[in-house]
Image (cartoon, grey):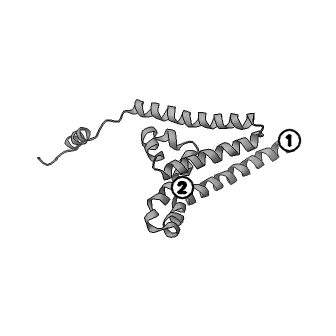
Amino acid sequence: MKPIQSKEEYQTYVDYKTPNSPIFKNCFNAFWVGGLICAIGQIIFEICKIRGIDETNSYAIVSMLLVFSSAFLTALNIFNKIGKFAGAGSLIPITGFANSIVSPAMEYKSEGYIMGVGAKMFTVAGPVLVYGISSSVIVGIIYIIFNTQSLILV
């Protein structure tokens, strides 16, 4: 193989070696898998409502069941296969949060349950929780500022 001498030759080489990504197929898979996860959550919510559970507790039950099922499927190495197939469709709903916490822990299970699973579980969870708590505090402050001004005007 002769050496690459110009930017055009290099770009031609890169285009030749880079596989084409099926963008429409990937978007379609992300759309229907994410929609299926949301539909499952809605079904759980409706079952809770039929059983007489109030709306607030129904939301909590849906969140807990989706997070638990995602963590359980991640531990069985099933959720990772779903993630490869669906991409962001499986990671954007709340199921992606559980996956991001359990995945690092599963990678280090050979180091033991305390120093492996227990310690590594928080390598990803820490920044996620810090961002979530920080952004909720900022949104709360903004809400209080605008809500207080509207109360003063009335």
**x then y, percent, for residue 108:** 45, 63
Taking the image as shown, residue 112 lies to the left or right of residue 149, namely left
**x then y, percent, for residue 45:** 68, 37
Q: Is 10 or 54 nearer to us in this picture?
A: 54
Secondary structure at numbered mark 2 = helix
**x then y, percent, for residue 42:** 64, 35
On screen, residue 49 above or below 78? above
* Marks 2 and 1, how far apart at CA: 45 Å
Secondary structure at numbered mark 1 = helix
Taking the image as shown, residue 29 lies to the left or right of residue 137, namely left
Which is in the foreground here, disc 2 or disc 1?
A: 2
Amino acid on which the number 1 mark rests in the picture: Leu
Q: Is 147 or 31 nearer to us in this picture?
A: 31
Residue shown at 46% from the left, 43% from the top: 83
Instruction: Pick the quarter of the image with the C terminus.
Output: top right
Residue shown at 45% from the left, 47% from the top: 80
Taking the image as shown, residue 132 lies to the left or right of residue 88, namely right
Q: Is 86 or 143 nearer to us in this picture?
A: 86
Q: Residue furthest right?
A: 154
Q: Earlier in the sequence, mark 2 or mark 1?
A: 2
Q: Which residue is mark 2?
A: 101
**x then y, percent, for residue 143:** 74, 46
Q: Which residue is mark 1?
A: 153
